[in-house]
Image (cartoon, coloured by chain):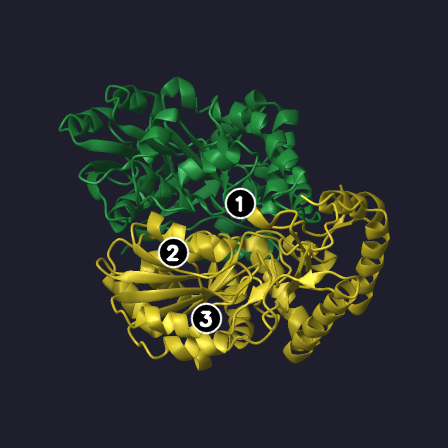
Chain colours: A green, B yellow
Amino acid sequence: MSYKLFIPGPIAVSDKTLQAMAQGMIGHRSPDFVKLYESIQPDLQELFYTKDPVYISTSSAWGVMEGAIRNVVRPGKKVLNCMNGAFSDKWNDVSKRCGKEAVALKFDWGQPVDPAAVRAELDKGGFDAVTIIHNETSCGCMSDIDALMAVVREFPEVIAIVDTVSSFSVLPIKKDELGIDVLITGSQKALALPPGLALCSVSKKALDRAAEVTDRGYYFDFVEFQANHEKGMTPSTPTIALIYALKSKLEDIKAEGAANRYARHARLNKTVKDHVLAKGFKLFPKDGYGSLALNCFANNLNYDLSALNKTLKSKHGLVIDGGYGKLKGKTFRISNMGDETDETIAAMLKAFDAALAETPVLPAA
Amino acid sequence: MSYKLFIPGPIAVSDKTLQAMAQGMIGHRSPDFVKLYESIQPDLQELFYTKDPVYISTSSAWGVMEGAIRNVVRPGKKVLNCMNGAFSDKWNDVSKRCGKEAVALKFDWGQPVDPAAVRAELDKGGFDAVTIIHNETSCGCMSDIDALMAVVREFPEVIAIVDTVSSFSVLPIKKDELGIDVLITGSQKALALPPGLALCSVSKKALDRAAEVTDRGYYFDFVEFQANHEKGMTPSTPTIALIYALKSKLEDIKAEGAANRYARHARLNKTVKDHVLAKGFKLFPKDGYGSLALNCFANNLNYDLSALNKTLKSKHGLVIDGGYGKLKGKTFRISNMGDETDETIAAMLKAFDAALAETPVLPAA
C-alpha cells in the first residue's frame, strides 16, 4: 500500500526524515537528551519568531489545543472561539467539554474570521481567551492573522491562542510581533513529519495566567513545561524518535532558508490553483483568503471524487482529499505543504489531469 | 553517542522495530489506517486478557493516567491513590491538579501496596476510583495485583485504574478476570518501543461512568476513544510511525509466544538478581515484591554510582540507572525488559563486573 499523500495531513514524509527517526533511544533525563533538546531550541524560536521557549508535547496538536483552554481560562470567565471550519468549530466543542464557558463566533465554512466581529464580541467583556485557527485546513481558508491580532491586542486581559498546524513554516507567523500568547503547531502537516508531536510557544502573560488556574492538570500544564524546559527536558517521557525527525527537518529548513521555503510554498500553491481553476473548478474559500498550504476547490463540475481518488491511487500512486466532513464530495483538497517541489507538483498535476479525464461526472442531485 | 540502555525506560529498541517506524505515512481517516488499526486489536486484546477494546493514545502513559482520573471521578466523589514510589506518589499530585479530591494511601518506597489498607480506606466510602501502579519502576517494587483486585472488587462502584507501564507483557495481567476497569501501559518500557504511544483498555463500567462526567475533556476522553474505535480509528491524528512499530512488536511477541516471553523475563530477572546479590548488594524492595521487569538494588556497598555508569558508558557502551529521585545514589536499577536475551544479559553483567572493579567506594556519609 505504498502511495504518496497529497492530502492536507498527514502529508508525505521524506526518506531522510523517516531514517532520522530510526536511531537508538536515549534516556530522557540524561545529558544526551538535554543536548538534543537544547540544540533545536534556537531554530524553533527562529521559526516561531519568538524569544519565548518552544515546548515539545508528545501528542497531536489537539492535545495542546485542549490543554491551552485548561491552562488560561479561569472559572467564571469565558473563551471566545472563532469558528469558520471543522477544526475551529470543534475547538468550541472541546472548550465546553473542559467545563469552560465557551462563546461561539460563527462564520460560514470558507469565510475568514472577521476582525470587526471579534472586536464586537470581546467588547462585551468577561473573556479570558480567544481561539483562532489561522489556516482552516478543512476548507482551505486562511484568515488575516495580522488584522485579527491587531484587534485582540486591544484587550490585554485576553490570551490569544492561535493554531497554525497547517500554516506554520508555510509563511512567517511572527508570534512576538503580533502578540500571540500561545502559538501551536503539529508535526504532520506543514513540517512534513510523522504525526505524534506538537509544538507550542507560550508567552509570559499566558504562563502567569496558567499559574492562577488550579485544575489545569499535569500533562499539558504550561507551568510544568516551563519548569522542565529550564532543565532542557519535557514533563513526561517525550517522543524521542519524532524529536530526532524534528531535528533533521530543522536542518532541512535551515539549508533551504526560511525565505526560500515561504517562496516555494507560495509558488507551488499558485501552480496548483492556476492549473485546477483553468479546468473550470472554483476555489472554495472566499476570494483572497485561500490557504497557501493547500487549495480547497469546489467540485462545481460535479465529478465523482471517490472515483477520481481511486484512479489516482491505483494508477498513479498518489491520493488527494475528497472533502472534509460535511464538504465530502462537494470539495477536494490538494496539499502543497512540506517537501513538495516544482517537479513533484507538476507530476501530481499530470496524474490529476489523466485521472480526471477518465472520471465520470455525476448526475445533478 | 551510541550506547545501549539498561535503564528501566526508555529501553533499547531493536533495529527491526526502528525500521518498522520508517514507513511511508497513510491518512488516518483512510481504509488503510482502519485496516492497520483493526489488524492489531486481536493481538492487543490477547495481551490485555480482555474482550474490551484497546485504545491507542498518542501520548506517553501519563496522559492517559491523568485522563483516566478526569474520566471517572465525579464531582463530590474521591479517588484513592495507592502510593509506594515516585510515580504512584505523583499520581496523587496529578489527581489533585485535575481538581479532584484525592486521598493519599502512603507506603514507604519499596514496600508493596497493602490490600488490607486499601480495604480500610475504601470502606470509608465516597470513592469513585482507585489508582494502583502494579510495578513501581522507581523502586523496582511489584505489588500483588491479584490480592489488590480481590479487595477492589468488593466495592463495585469503585473504578480500578491500574498502570502497568513496566510490567505489561513481562507477566500476564488478566484484566477481565481481575476486574480491572482501566488498564494502562506505555510503549517505551516492557514493550521495547520508542516512547510516544500509550495503550489503554477500558471496561463498560468505566465507559458508563465517563459518560456521567461532563468536564472530562476531549483528547483523553474514553467515550471518544470508544466511538472512534468502532470505526477503526482514533479521536485525534495518531502517531502512525509508532503504530507501525507496535504492529511489528506484536508480531515478535506472537512469534516468541507470550508464555515463552514471560518465562524469559522471569529467568533474566533472576539471573541479574542472583549475580548482583552475590556481590554483596541487597535488593531494595521488600522481600518477595521485587519487580520481574527490573531489579532495584540498594547501594549498601556505597559505590560511586555516577563513576560506575560513566565507565559502563564510555568503556562498555551501555548504561544502567543510578537511582530515581530521592533514591539517586542510594539505589541502582537494571532493566531486563523488552528484547533482552541470556546472551545480552550475560554481556551486560560481564561489563558490570569489570566496571565495578574500577569504581571507587565512597566514604561513609
**Residue at screen point 49% across, 52% down:** B59
Q: Chain of mark 3?
A: B
* Drawn side of residue B148 relative to residue B102, left or right: right
Report x, y in % for residue B174: 50, 78
Which label number is shown at residue A11?
A: 1
Label pair 3/1, CB-CB below 8 angstroms:
no
Query: Residue at position x 34%, y 26% from top?
Result: A205
Q: Specify few, some or many for label 3: CA neighbours under 10 Å numbering under 14, 14-19, or 20 or more.
A: some
* Along the viewing direction, whichever of A27 and A329 lies nearer the viewer: A27
Check whether the beta carbons of the residues at disc 2 and disc 3 lie within 8 A of each other: no
Image side of residue B277 versus residue B298, left or right:
right
- Helix, strand or loop at mark 3: loop
Left or right, A363 with respect to A36, comes to left
> Quick one: quadrant of the C terminus of chain B?
top right
Q: Which residue is mark 3?
A: B114
Quarter residue A304 falls in: bottom left
**Chain of the residue on which disc 2 is drawn:** B
Q: Position of residue B349 (x, y in %)?
A: 81, 60
Q: Amino acid at mark 1?
A: Ile
